[in-house]
Image: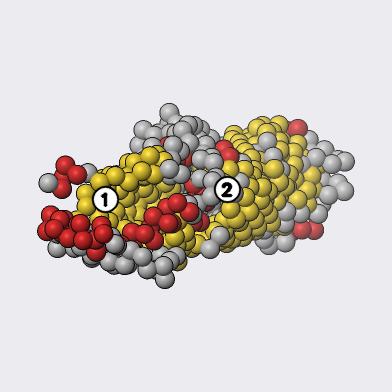
């Protein structure tokens, strides 16, 4: 092969390899017959010139070595591609060592085909989406060296480190370790297929993914296209203080780095709150938009299921200025749920109440070291129908109240009385408060306000009870006739009997008292 032709092949092949458009990295070689050192130095200079013109940045490359027989083989060290999206940022791409192999006949094809590239010590540092438009392209001056079109059949880059930089340089970047990374079909301005295995930092777990990436948008890396399928396994949720369980998730994603649409499912067989509740099997199906440059996730919606309850949520998991970590803000809608399921999740003891639950609420969960129930803020409206109390003492009291409220105190056919609840509530600091709470059974309605401690089990409510029957009708025998003259005293606010009451004590031992001073 004439030296001029051989040199030309070396030049545009090396230039093509160095241009790997999806990640901006290069590939070069060494085999049995070495190219003379002066030619290598000349090639290195020409390659750097071509890359500088192509990426409009001061690309660095060291220690280029090339051999031709029995095939094309090249190596190089310390490749650096600056981040041109904004001044002062760390390099977009760095590679400690590059290795390239190709069969000589493949170098004569159009486009040029390189069989294998290996990138050792690849580090990618992606800047966040910019708030300003990209800078105009720099004016090219002097002689230009153009990159030839090429395709790399396979790129191996195991051990790659990926960093997502923050807008605030004082904040630590998001970090991912790609334990295994294989790219196929890389080239100048080309998208590529990829297979990767990476560790997710929070929650810690292993992600396996395949898909298509690129071509890389060097002026705005966050606008680079990406799509594929993922499998996320063995994610330990205990890293979030207050919950535990091992999560798995599968799904598909499509979009650009700062706006990725994800559809998937999650499965946590042993989800648990650290408040002492029982573990439950939690599954979800979700549609979400993810900003891959900062990790902010927008849920639209998430449909969750545990025990016999369904939950639909919409909202976001996003960082806030000056805040470390992300805040969860959700609109929660439960139209097909059981109150005992929620209580099972919140407290380890037997649920105090069973019944059908409907709820709409707003949830706010800021980051922090405290437990989830200490940090959670929840406010909304709820309705519990066909409710029954687990405590036999309370159930007997509810039945007696219904009998007296209907004016049938000795009617034993009235039994197993179900109740209905509705009200406005707020949850904070492990305390459940009610600005309005209405409790109804046949013949009686109670309206109270107060609080219940999820950890202490303490009850503190005040309000009133209104019965359909008069006070004398609530009694039998002689007491009925004794109380007849007092009926007008208790007939207030449109009720047959009006009683101001207080409920205090604990869930296991509630004490209901009439506040006589408020009656007179």
Q: Please name the residue that numbered disc 2 is placed on.
A: 278
Q: Where residue 477 sits: x, y (%)?
A: 29, 62
Q: Where residue 55 sits: x, y (%)?
A: 52, 45
At numbered mark 1, what does the secondary structure look like: helix, strand or loop? Answer: strand
Pointer 2 local density, CA inside 10 Å: few below 14, some 14–19, many at least 20: some
| CA distance for labels 2 and 1 | 30 Å
Q: Quadrant of residue 227?
A: bottom right
Q: Quadrant of residue 67?
A: top right
Pointer 1 local density, CA inside 10 Å: few below 14, some 14–19, many at least 20: many
Q: Is residue 74 left or right of residue 408?
A: right
Viewer-side residue, 371 vs 356: 356
Viewer-side residue, 171 vs 49: 171
Q: Where residue 391 sits: x, y (%)?
A: 47, 52
Q: Please name the residue that numbered disc 1 is placed on.
A: 448
Q: Quadrant of residue 49?
A: top right
Can residue 63 be seen here? The reply is: yes
At numbered mark 2, what does the secondary structure look like: helix, strand or loop? Answer: loop
Question: Residue 120, relative to residue 362: is it above or below?
Answer: above
Q: Earlier in the sequence, mark 2 or mark 1?
A: 2
Specify how the rendered protein is coloured: secondary structure
Residue at 87% over, 41% down: 32
């Amino acid at each position: 092969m004439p030296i001029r032709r051989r040199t030309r092949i070396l030049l545009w092949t090396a230039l093509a390899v160095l241009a790997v458009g999806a990640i901006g990295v290069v590939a070069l070689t060494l085999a049995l017959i070495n190219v003379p050192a002066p030619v290598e130095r000349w090639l290195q200079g020409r390659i750097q010139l071509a890359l500088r013109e192509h990426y409009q940045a001061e690309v660095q490359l060291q220690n280029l070595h090339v051999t031709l027989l029995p095939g094309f083989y090249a190596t190089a060290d310390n490749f650096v591609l600056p981040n041109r999206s904004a001044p002062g940022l760390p390099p977009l791409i760095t590679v400690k060592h590059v290795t390239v192999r190709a069969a000589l006949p493949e170098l004569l094809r159009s486009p040029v085909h390189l069989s294998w590239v290996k990138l050792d010590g690849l580090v990618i540092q992606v800047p966040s989406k910019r708030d300003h438009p990209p800078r105009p392209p720099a004016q090219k001056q002097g002689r230009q060296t153009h990159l030839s079109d090429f395709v790399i059949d396979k790129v191996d880059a195991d051990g790659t480190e990926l960093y997502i930089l923050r807008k605030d340089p004082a904040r630590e970047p998001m970090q991912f370790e790609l334990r295994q990374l294989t790219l196929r079909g890389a080239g100048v301005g080309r998208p590529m297929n990829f297979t990767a295995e990476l560790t997710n930092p929070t929650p810690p777990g292993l992600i396996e993914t395949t898909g298509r990436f690129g071509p890389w948008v060097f002026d705005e890396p966050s606008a680079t296209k990406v799509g594929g399928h993922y499998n996320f396994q063995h994610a330990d949720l205990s890293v979030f203080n207050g919950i535990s369980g091992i999560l798995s998730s599968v799904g598909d994603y499509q979009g650009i780095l700062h706006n990725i649409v994800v559809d998937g499912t999650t499965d946590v067989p042993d989800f648990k709150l650290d408040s002492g509740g029982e573990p439950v099997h939690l599954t979800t199906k979700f549609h979400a938009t993810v900003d891959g440059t900062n990790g902010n996730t927008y849920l639209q919606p998430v449909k969750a299921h545990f025990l016999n309850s369904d939950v639909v949520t919409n909202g976001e998991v996003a960082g806030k200025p000056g805040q470390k970590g992300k805040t969860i803000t959700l609109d929660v809608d439960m139209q097909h749920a059981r109150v005992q399921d929620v209580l099972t999740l919140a407290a380890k003891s037997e649920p105090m109440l069973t019944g059908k639950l409907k709820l709409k609420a707003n949830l706010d969960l800021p980051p922090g070291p405290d437990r989830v129930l200490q940090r959670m803020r929840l406010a909304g409206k709820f309705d519990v129908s066909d409710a029954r109390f687990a405590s036999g003492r309370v159930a007997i009291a509810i039945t007696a109240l219904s009998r007296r409220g209907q004016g049938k105190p000795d009617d034993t056919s009235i039994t197993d009385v179900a109740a209905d609840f509705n009200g406005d509530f707020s949850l904070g600091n492990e305390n459940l408060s009610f600005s309005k709470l209405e409790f109804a059974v046949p013949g009686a309605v109670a309206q109270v306000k107060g609080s219940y401690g999820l950890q202490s089990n303490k009850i503190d409510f005040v309000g009133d009870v209104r019965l359909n029957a008069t006070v004398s009708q609530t009694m039998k025998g002689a007491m009925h006739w004794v109380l007849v003259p007092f009926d007008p005293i208790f007939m207030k606010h449109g009720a047959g009997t009006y009683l101001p009451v207080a409920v205090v004590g604990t869930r296991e031992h509630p004490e209901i008292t009439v506040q006589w001073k408020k009656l007179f």
